[in-house]
Image (tube, grey):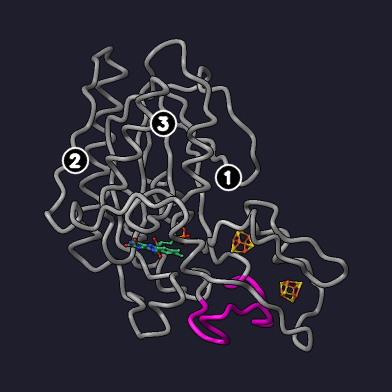
Amino acid sequence: MKGIINYFSTTGNTKRMVEYFTHQTESVEFSLMDMKKLIMPDFANYDVIGFAFPVEFFGLPRFVLNWIRYIPKQTTIRNAFLLLSFSNIPGTALIQARNELKSKLLKVIAGHALHMPDNYPISRMKGFTANQAPNQAEKSRFHLFIRIFNELMHSIQEGHEILEATFRLSMVNYFMNIPDPVAAKRSMGFKYLDRQKCTKCAICEEVCPSKAIHLTPYPEFNEVQCLGCWGCYHHCPTQAIYTNKIRNKGHYLAEHLPTLFDKLLLHKENP
Ligand SMILES: Cc1cc2nc3c(=O)[nH]c(=O)nc-3n(C[C@H](O)[C@H](O)[C@H](O)COP(=O)(O)O)c2cc1C
Ligand code: SF4
Ligand code: SF4
């Protein structure tokens, strides 16, 4: 079987989750597509289509929502699945994504949200880093999900139709459902640059998903286009970017936390 996973990852948690997942799914040969490349694959070429992204303000990051809304309506119903990473409360992101994809005739047959370290600088600054996530129980639940996913793939291969997934969420997730598309942007505030620290390396320009940064020769921020993802803030190697809310604190990149992947990495034959 052929599959594709369209992923969005600001600081690497979701990407690691995806890499681990593809490593553990034998019956599907997966291609990975970084949504930031703004390329829309032809889903007709795949048996199963994945969407992977972090939770933002208890829902979908605005970039991901826009990307999904740009997907052309499929000519026939296709099987899809969701891989979400979150650090605190996932809210109703799984349900929101399932419903958005349904309108494109992409039927979500499975989905999982995995607890990962927090990349929201304001939380990290206050000490809520979740650096130890996922814990043993969370890892086990992820492995159970992968096992069920593999069984679903075998059922599809045998010609069975799979029903749309239902997600049972704890009550707190419904209370935290705040469908506010500009919440992330507002929470970040305005960005500023410390020119003494900036080396004009252009990393911030490269990582920005919404092309809101241009070097002239120092970075300039287009606050209208900015989505408040904090990507530039986290990736700047000299911490030259700051906002009116936070400076020199709360940075995070998954690659700086080497234990994260080791924690997920168990023997393939014993998930
Ligand atoms: C702007 C912003 C908002 C966030 N909102 C939530 C949230 O509502 N609930 C949650 O559990 N985690 C939230 N997070 C944390 C991320 O979902 C989590 O750290 C995720 O694993 C990051 O994945 P990535 O490294 O692939 O970008 C938020 C992070 C950011 C930057
Ligand atoms: S990533 Fe940092 S150092 Fe590099 S150009 Fe951007 S602000 Fe300057
Ligand atoms: S300017 Fe920075 S915070 Fe805004 S969208 Fe680009 S990378 Fe994200």
Residue at 42% from the left image edge and 36% from the top image edge: 50
Question: Does 214 sit left or right of 41 as displayed?
Answer: right
Where is residue 214 shown, x and y percent of the image?
79, 61
Q: Looking at the image, is mark 1 or mark 2 nearer the viewer?
A: 2
Of badges 3 and 1, the one in the foreground is: 1
| Residue occupied by mark 3 | 28
Asked if residue 267 is positioned above or below residue 1 in the image, the reply reads below
**Which numbered disc, 3 or 1, marks the residue that appears first in the sequence?**
3
Q: Is residue 197 above or below residue 8?
A: below
Of the numbered discs 1 and 2, the one sitting upstream in the chain is 1
Judge by depth and name the residue closer to the eye, 2 or 200. Answer: 200
Q: Which residues are magenta?
A: 233-251
Give the amino acid at mark 3.
Val
Mark-to-mark CA distance, 1 and 2: 26 Å
| Ligand 3 falls in quadrant | bottom right
User: For the point 53% across and 47% down, which residue is it?
Assistant: 63
Q: Is mark 3 within 8 Å of ligand 1?
A: no
Q: Which residue is identified by label 2?
A: 167
**Image point 65% across, 58% down: which residue?**
208
Q: Dominant secondary structure of the magenta stretch?
A: loop
**Which image quarter is the N terminus in?**
top left
Q: Residue 114: where, in percent of width, then height? A: 30, 56
The answer to whether residue 93 is left or right of residue 197 is left
Kind of residue indicated by mark 1? Asp
Residue 230 belongs to magenta span: no
Task: Give the quadrant of residue 28.
Answer: top left
Instruction: Please state which of residues 191 and 38 is positioned toward the viewer in this rendering.
Output: 191
Q: Nearer the viewer, residue 99 or 106?
A: 99
Separation (CA) of disc 2 from disc 3: 24 Å
Residue 184 placement (x, y as % from top left): 46, 61
Q: Secondary structure at mark 1?
A: strand
Q: Residue at x 66, y 74 (%)?
A: 236
